Image (tube, grey):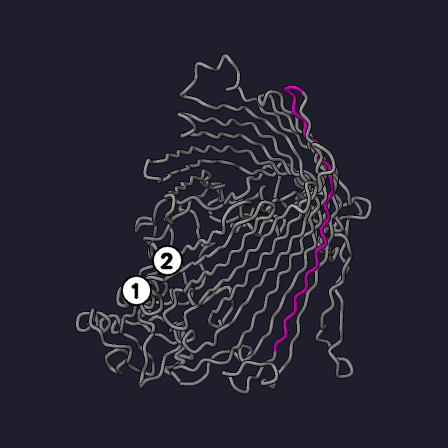
């Protein structure tokens, strides 16, 4: 739990009213997109690959599409006669496809990316603000709009965002300032309904199938494909609203003493209206040379769905600050507390069997009704203190402490204390550094150590829950209810602690035109929430979360910046960064020591960490070139069989694939004569090895502006 300060724009006191307007128009295009092999090339390679398995003259159909030698010949003939011509989308029987021997063959090459995606997509942004102030009051009002068009040529998606920013600060008396801010954002995102899993959107299917798959029409009616599904889809409408209201004040009862109090209310609202239906097209996927026209999508998509979510966050903060200078010694003392109360709701209602797909409303559907919901709630309370000391603005010291409590931790372990400290030495202020002027104008050496708490827990971490569900056992005509096995919980689950040690320097050169910032850091996460010992399957439930794991991150960062002001009012600055870090699990209870999942995010879910593991590491097989004819002999049926002494790679065979010349060969690292994953554990990982992955990151940011002109 940390403190995040968000500063919004505000006007200047005593300034005239100022009106600003800025805009930005931009266009984007993909840097690269996949290129399709021609229909003939793709089909010939697929046919050659399949024949290596069984020597058949023809492949079995793939979703109703067949390939043989005659089809490849006709595809090449089509390319010679019609390639590059604009034939429109209407397909001609006998030229572009045909029914031969009771099977469907398609000959025409298509470029679905060209048909489906725009080359350029526009974006526009507009902002207008009014600001100013009197002797005791300043104000700021800003409104903005952002519009982005999607890349789809048919039923294109659209994103619009409207925002409002209002702030007022005033001095009621010499000892009291009050402030108020309002932020509002409204986003509307329209996207076509997806007639398959959200994991596999139309983009996936667009590039999944070869170029001869039909993307045109026949007798004016479409074939089954991703473009057809998008063309016939209704538009989903997702809205997201954010409202944040802040009220605060600063009291100055004594010289050097200020009392600050702020209350912030934040509310998020989201709605999603989905209208499904069905898609009608020539469904050649049925096979057997058939391509009946009609609806082919699942009845589960013939639905309307209302979805909504909303959350409330109440945040309060109060603190006192006392500043005192004694000769060349400066002191600053801060103490206070903060609290957060958060609630979240989500619900979805769905009804199937639309009477009219053009009217997607719950009362206008007649089928099954489904309802879903969820709710979440947590609170935190914290107290903090800070002491700053400075001597001659040269020697700097800061001491901090936080005492935080969370409702998401065990009853006896809700509270944690998290100290931090930092020190700095502005060595350029020393007389013995005068020789560096004017080349080096500033140099500060600094170091810090600090800790912060992370609650990182859900309701199931502290409460034993039993999820209800239907058993699918019918008793008395009723689907009997059942509940899952109660989960185990830890009675001593407390905060994770994130501690960071940092050493760095800041330097400026050439009258502050050139700057260098360098840091080395080590961040340690202790008392990580982990599942602990892996229980046997006979336990019937998972192990409870407990504070056991530890993780360490070691890294460095380097930033260089340059700024310059020209006589004509143009200001230019550029910043470049270079960084490197590595995260390592230094303590973790994992008795199975399963090899990490290639998808890093799944390791946290599955608990696939082990002591000594580098986060992001990828395990795989080491290649050994390609198989050649010399690695095989032919059996009596003319099939390729690996020679004796060549490592068996049948682990990867299946689904009609067998190894042959030209395939990738893997090394037998453990020397057992076969390639496999072993038990897929750290102790027995077969022929897998830890692969190297890049770690360094670089970035470059530049900006320039001219006084009185809006330039970007």
Let me know if residue 419 appears in the view.
Answer: no
Vertical position of residue 644 compared to residue 217: above or below:
above
Residue 553: x %, y % from top left: 57, 36
What is the quadrant of residue 577 in the picture? top left
Judging depth in this view, the residue of 623 and 274 nearest the camera is 274
Q: Is residue 335 magenta?
A: yes
Judging depth in this view, the residue of 19 and 438 nearest the camera is 19
What is the quadrant of residue 25 in the picture? bottom left
What residue sits 42% from the left and 37% below the top? 575
Which circle marks residue 25 in the picture?
Answer: 2
Vertical position of residue 137 compared to residue 400: above or below:
below
Residue 36: x %, y % from top left: 31, 62
Residue 461: x %, y % from top left: 73, 52
**Circle 2 sits in a helix, a strand or a loop, which is it?**
strand
The answer to which of marks 1 and 2 sits earlier in the sequence is 2
Residue 136: x %, y % from top left: 61, 46
> Which region shows up in magenta?
327-350
């Amino acid at each position: 739990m940390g403190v995040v300060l968000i500063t919004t724009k505000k006007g200047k006191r005593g300034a005239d009213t100022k009106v600003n307007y800025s805009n930005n128009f931009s266009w984007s295009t993909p840097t690269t997109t996949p290129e399709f092999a021609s229909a003939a090339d793709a089909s010939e390679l697929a046919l050659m690959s399949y024949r290596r398995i069984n020597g058949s003259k023809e492949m079995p159909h793939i979703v109703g599409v067949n390939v043989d030698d005659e089809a490849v010949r006709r595809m090449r003939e089509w390319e010679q006669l019609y390639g590059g011509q604009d034939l429109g989308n209407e397909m001609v029987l006998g030229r572009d496809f045909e029914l031969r021997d009771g099977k469907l063959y398609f000959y025409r090459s298509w470029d679905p990316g060209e048909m489906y995606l725009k080359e350029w997509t526009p974006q526009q942004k507009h902002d207008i603000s009014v600001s100013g102030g009197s002797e005791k009051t300043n104000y700021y009002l800003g409104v903005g709009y952002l519009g982005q068009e999607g890349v789809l040529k048919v039923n294109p998606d659209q994103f619009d965002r409207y925002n409002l920013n209002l702030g007022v600060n005033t001095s009621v008396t010499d000892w009291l300032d009050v402030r108020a801010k309002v932020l509002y954002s409204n986003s509307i995102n329209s996207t076509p309904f997806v007639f398959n899993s959200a994991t596999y959107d139309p983009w996936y299917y667009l590039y999944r199938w070869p170029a001869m798959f039909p993307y045109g029409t026949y007798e004016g009616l479409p074939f089954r494909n991703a473009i057809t599904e998008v063309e016939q889809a209704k538009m989903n409408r997702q809205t997201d609203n954010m409202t944040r209201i802040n009220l605060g004040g600063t009291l100055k009862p004594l010289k050097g003493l200020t009392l600050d109090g702020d209350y912030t209310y934040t509310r998020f609202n989201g709605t999603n209206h989905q209208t499904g239906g069905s898609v009608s097209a020539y469904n050649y996927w049925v096979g057997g040379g058939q391509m009946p026209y009609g609806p082919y999508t699942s009845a589960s998509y013939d639905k309307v769905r209302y979805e909504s979510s909303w959350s409330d966050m109440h945040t309060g903060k109060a603190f006192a600050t006392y500043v005192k200078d004694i000769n060349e010694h400066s002191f600053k003392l801060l103490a206070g507390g903060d609290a957060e109360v958060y609630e979240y709701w989500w619900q979805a209602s769905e009804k199937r069997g639309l009477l009219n797909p053009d009217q997607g409303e719950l009362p206008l559907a007649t089928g099954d009704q489904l309802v879903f919901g969820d709710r979440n709630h947590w609170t935190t309370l914290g107290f903090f203190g800070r002491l700053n000391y400075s001597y001659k603005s040269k020697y700097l010291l800061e001491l901090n402490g936080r005492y935080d409590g969370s409702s998401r931790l065990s009853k006896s372990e809700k509270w944690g204390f998290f100290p931090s400290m930092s020190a700095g030495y502005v060595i350029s202020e020393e007389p013995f550094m005068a020789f560096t002027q004017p080349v080096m104008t500033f140099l500060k050496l600094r170091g810090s150590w600090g800790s912060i708490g992370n609650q990182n827990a859900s309701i199931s971490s502290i409460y034993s829950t039993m999820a209800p569900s239907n058993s699918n056992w019918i008793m008395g005509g009723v689907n009997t209810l059942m509940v899952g096995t109660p989960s185990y919980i830890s009675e001593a689950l407390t905060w994770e602690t994130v501690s960071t040690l940092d050493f760095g320097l800041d330097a400026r050169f050439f009258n502050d035109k050139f700057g260098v910032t360098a840091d080395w850091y080590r961040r340690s996460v202790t008392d990580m929430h982990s599942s602990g010992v892996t229980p046997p399957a006979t336990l019937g439930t998972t192990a409870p979360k407990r504070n056991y794991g530890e993780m360490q991150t070691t890294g460095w960062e380097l930033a260089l910046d340059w700024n310059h002001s020209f006589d004509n009012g143009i200001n230019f600055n550029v910043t470049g960064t270079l960084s490197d870090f590595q995260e390592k699990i230094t303590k973790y209870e994992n008795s199975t020591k399963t090899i990490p999942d290639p998808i890093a995010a799944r390791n946290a879910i599955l608990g696939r960490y082990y002591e000594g593991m580098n986060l992001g590491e990828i395990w795989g097989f080491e290649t050994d070139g390609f198989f050649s004819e010399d690695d095989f002999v032919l059996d009596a049926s003319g099939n390729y069989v690996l020679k004796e002494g060549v490592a068996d790679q049948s682990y990867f065979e299946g689904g009609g694939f067998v190894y042959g010349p030209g395939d990738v060969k893997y090394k037998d690292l453990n020397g057992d004569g076969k390639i496999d994953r072993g038990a897929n554990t750290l102790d027995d990982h077969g022929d897998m090895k830890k692969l190297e992955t890049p770690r360094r990151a670089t970035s470059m940011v530049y900006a320039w502006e001219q006084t009185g002109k809006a330039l970007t």
